[in-house]
Image: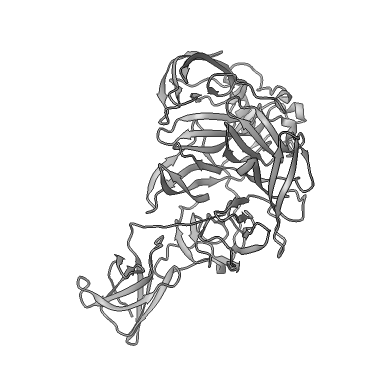
Amino acid sequence: MTRAALALGVAAAIGACGSGKPLTVPSVAATVGSTPTDVNAVSVSPFPGTLDASPTTQISFLGASGTRVSDVVAVGSASGTHAGKLKRYSTGTGESFLPQTRFVPGESVRVTAKVITAGHAATVRTNFTIAFNAPVPQAAFPKHRGSPHAVQHYLSAPALTPSAVQITTPPKPGAAPGDLFLAPYEGTGRPGPMIVDQTGQLVWFHPLPAGESATNLHPQTYRNKKVLTWWQGHILKIGFGQGEDEIYDTSYRPIATVSAGNGYHADLHEFRLTPQGTAWIDAFDPVYVNLSSVGGLRHGVLTDSVVEEIDVKTGLVMWEWHALGHIPLRDSYTPVPHIPSHYWDFVHINSIDPGPDGQLLLSSRSTSTIFDVDMRSGGFRWRIGGKYSSFNRGPGTFFFYQHDATWEPGGLVSVFDNGATPPREAQSRGLLLDPNTQTKAVTLVKAYINPNKTLLATSQGSLTKLSNGNWLMGYGGLPNFTEYDSSGDVLLDGTLGHNVQNYRTYLAHWSGHPTTRPKIAAQAAGGTATVNASWNGATRVAAWQVLGGADKRSLTPIATTPTSGFETAIAIHSSPTYVAVAALDAAGHRLSTSHAIALSD
């Protein structure tokens, strides 16, 4: 975006409300360390005081089971009273009011409504300001080519060309069983969600259209069934994504797509399902603000981070929180830009984890802080790290530009400490922290550091506790991954190809049952033939049976061999006119059969 284009955008945004002034950000220092209060009987979002609500925002009323809403009055200071309709959440915990017309940028909005929740009637209120939205720069994340030798190729499935996976430390005794869930992008291979076993052999790959990438592939539970989930879309140069979150079943069929609400696009950083059938996601929102209070431009642009809980079935926004107005601008370690075309990434929320007692754990990379947010009020219960930590910090508890903050049993918190960028530590670490709200001190329970190699991840990363108590650490942009036991010893180590990136790494049991048929390739030479067989995503195949004959409608078994990795090569000492392959399970039962093909010389 050129300087002239930005100036026109600012003028248009300012002129939209006729004020002649850009949005001014008031001091929010009072929110630091404040004790949240119950402003309403239910959570109403946009929260009171929100500075940059979307012009297309719905008004969300989230409470206990059975919450009902009526008599909603929404009045904009420029647009007047808004008619609309109420829609209930499938969870039965509230409703959203959907205005019929947009709000006006820069105007203030006041909302009142009557609610009945937990048998009590009350009047609830909120007030917020509508954002001057800035255009989203569509420049793609820079493409870094990798090595052509670090790409997988299969004769029977030539469309599958993901990054290779190299296991540098094979699983040792005590390593957790299961498959690795990755979503490689960048490099030479094709991007897409990918499952591999612990030898690095491909299990399943979902190639994406040109220009699209995926992050956050892992199994979750939706409607009491195991599913595969990931984010898919465009990764932008400014460090965020625009896309949607996908839910597929164990047969790799799409069953739901989760989109951000209120006019936003789902960002790549978080997609977390709940047992109630809701999804926690993040979005980013560039808005025009007056940054003169922190030495920036009077007509500056910052990228606000937005957190939403979405009702998957209805698509309604049940809860929404904006970093702007809660996190003070002065908390950011990111330098304030002085060029109009440069957007200020002042907070960069990169993980969301709902916890006990209405708590929400958020990680903010640009402030090097982990926040415990009270879902009722939107205020902070406490914060670890950054410039204004709520806790005295013991040895080893300092972290920088972190990712993947997660609640652990007993009130502990795990986090991937990048330690860069800029470099603040020699290595990235996995940390288990104990924030004691009584003593106001945070102590280090355990740090996980690779003793065999220096791994400093400048971006991305994850730390996940496994089912057997081990820890899996993904190093994001490097993109290595390492499994540690509780003592910190390495039990598994591996990497993807050169210049490949992988936002998070997961390990879990997986059983896939594709509805597609197996794939086959075959070539004859001098009275013998080699048949190649694969079945993308199938996890029950124990052996392959080659079928052959002169008539493709009447083929008989001519060879059987145990499966060997994703693609199995089977030598046959004959040259039938047609061949096919049948996938067999461990008991020898036929699971599926490929199409028959002509055997070529």
Q: Position of residue 515 (x, y in %)?
A: 33, 57
Quarter of the image with the N terminus is top right
Q: Position of residue 72 (x, y in %)?
A: 46, 15
Q: Is residue 544 visible?
A: yes
Q: Position of residue 409 (x, y in %)?
A: 61, 44
Q: Position of residue 55 (x, y in %)?
A: 53, 24
Residue depicted at x 72% and y 23%: 30
On screen, residue 600 versus residue 351, left or right, reads left
Asked where in the image residue 66 lies, by quadrant, the reply is top left
Quarter of the image with the C terminus is bottom left
Q: Is residue 367 visible?
A: no
Asked where in the image residue 290 lies, by quadrant, the reply is top right
On screen, residue 153 versus residue 364, left or right, reads left
Location of residue 423 with respect to 582 vertically, above or below:
above
Instruction: Give the farthest residue toward the bottom.
Output: 526
On screen, residue 387 versus residue 172, left or right, reads right
- In depth, the one of 518 and 34 nearer the eye is 34
Location of residue 436 with respect to 521 vertically, above or below:
above
Residue depicted at x 44% and y 73%: 564
- In depth, the one of 110 and 561 nearer the eye is 561
Location of residue 332 with respect to 183 vertically, above or below:
above
Location of residue 371 with respect to 201 vertically, above or below:
above
- In depth, the one of 445 and 53 nearer the eye is 445
Asked where in the image residue 326 lies, by quadrant, the reply is top right
